[in-house]
């Protein structure tokens, strides 16, 4: 597992793209969830998004992947404007996501879940995704014919990640992939992200509260607080800023 803790360079791809979020705002009535957020994720890159509860992190993923339309701003996949496209169309273009909570097709077996995810996802590809190896490593191979809702929580979370990869994405949006997992399972999340990045060249955006995971895997992080971009930069630098500490722990006393 040493390669997980010391990320290796991502493979070069001739069709490398960027996922670009340009001045995006999301508002529900009079409530502005986030305002004027801009950033880029490159294929093979990893960007972390952190912030206190209610900062707008999950809503941001929902807007990027097409589950919600933005109120303002634009989203680009390469040169293509995908702003406001429905979820299934964005997935077909190569953007897949995972969910905070387990979100499988609960009444069908693990193998059928993977099949449905593959059919839902991008039509490009042909690469060997290494799915069988991941299933073996995560302990899912022996459960292929079991209903997904009968799996332990940790295996359901890992199945959700492998399903996202089965959709053949160019970009993965991971919403708290380590939430509720034991330490060993969190190491598997590391392995999954590094597999997607270094073996398949996926760009990865991670929303996560596990600061150890963020510091291990993300060379750059964004901090959202009350819908605004509070900080942007390397984890060690950003996490030491007084305004970031205050956002997590409350205003400090002088």
Image: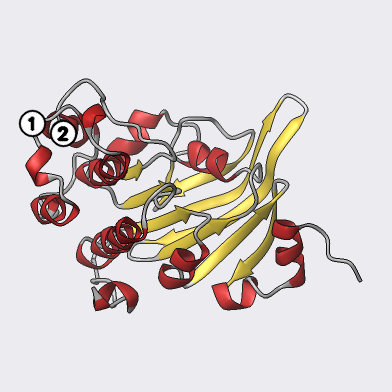
Q: Is residue 180 left or right of residue 37?
A: left
Under circle 1, the secondary element is loop
- Image quarter hosting the C terminus: bottom right
Question: Is residue 234 shown to the viewer in this render?
Answer: no
Give the residue at x 8% y 31%: 145
Give the residue at x 11% y 34%: 111
- Image quarter hosting the N terminus: bottom left
Give the residue at x 52% y 37%: 63
Give the residue at x 8% y 43%: 142
What label sits on residue 145 in the rendered view?
Answer: 1
Tell me whether the residue at label 2 lies in contact with that at label 1, contact meaning CB atoms closer than 8 angstroms: yes
What label sits on residue 110 in the rendered view?
Answer: 2
Question: Is residue 40 shown to the viewer in this render?
Answer: yes
Quote the CA–CA distance across marks 2 and 1: 6 Å
Q: Residues within 10 Å of mark 2 (few under 14, many from 20)?
A: many
**In the rendering, at what x and y percent does residue 220 appear?**
51, 69
Q: Quadrant of residue 252?
A: bottom right
**In the rendering, at what x and y percent does residue 29 appear?**
73, 24
Q: Is residue 56 left or right of residue 202?
A: right
Q: Is residue 13 above or below residue 202?
A: below
Q: Is residue 236 left or right of residue 181?
A: right
Q: Is residue 158 above or below residue 133?
A: above
What label sits on residue 251 in the rendered view?
Answer: none
């Amino acid at each position: 597992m040493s390669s997980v803790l010391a990320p290796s360079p991502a493979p070069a791809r001739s069709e490398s793209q960027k996922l670009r979020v340009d001045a995006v705002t999301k508002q529900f009535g009079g409530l502005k969830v986030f305002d004027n957020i801009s950033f880029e994720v490159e294929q093979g890159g990893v960007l972390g998004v952190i912030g206190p509860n209610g900062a707008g992190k999950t809503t941001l993923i929902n807007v990027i992947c097409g589950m919600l339309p933005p109120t303002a701003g634009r989203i680009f996949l390469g040169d293509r404007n995908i702003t406001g496209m429905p979820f299934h169309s964005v997935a077909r273009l190569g953007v897949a996501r995972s969910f905070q909570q387990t979100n499988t097709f609960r009444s069908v077996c693990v193998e059928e879940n993977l099949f449905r995810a593959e059919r839902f996802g991008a039509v490009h590809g042909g690469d060997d995704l290494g799915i069988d190896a991941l299933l073996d490593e995560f302990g899912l191979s022996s459960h292929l014919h079991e209903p997904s809702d009968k799996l332990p929580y940790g295996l359901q979370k890992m199945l959700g990640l492998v399903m996202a990869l089965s959709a053949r994405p160019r970009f993965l949006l991971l919403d708290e992939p380590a939430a509720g997992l034991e330490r060993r399972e969190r190491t598997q999340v590391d392995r999954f992200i590094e597999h997607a990045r270094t073996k398949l060249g996926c760009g990865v955006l991670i929303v996560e509260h596990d600061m150890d995971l963020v510091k291990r895997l993300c060379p750059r992080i964004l901090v959202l607080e009350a819908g605004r971009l509070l900080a942007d930069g390397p984890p060690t630098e950003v996490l030491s800023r007084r305004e970031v500490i205050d956002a997590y722990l409350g205003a400090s006393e002088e």
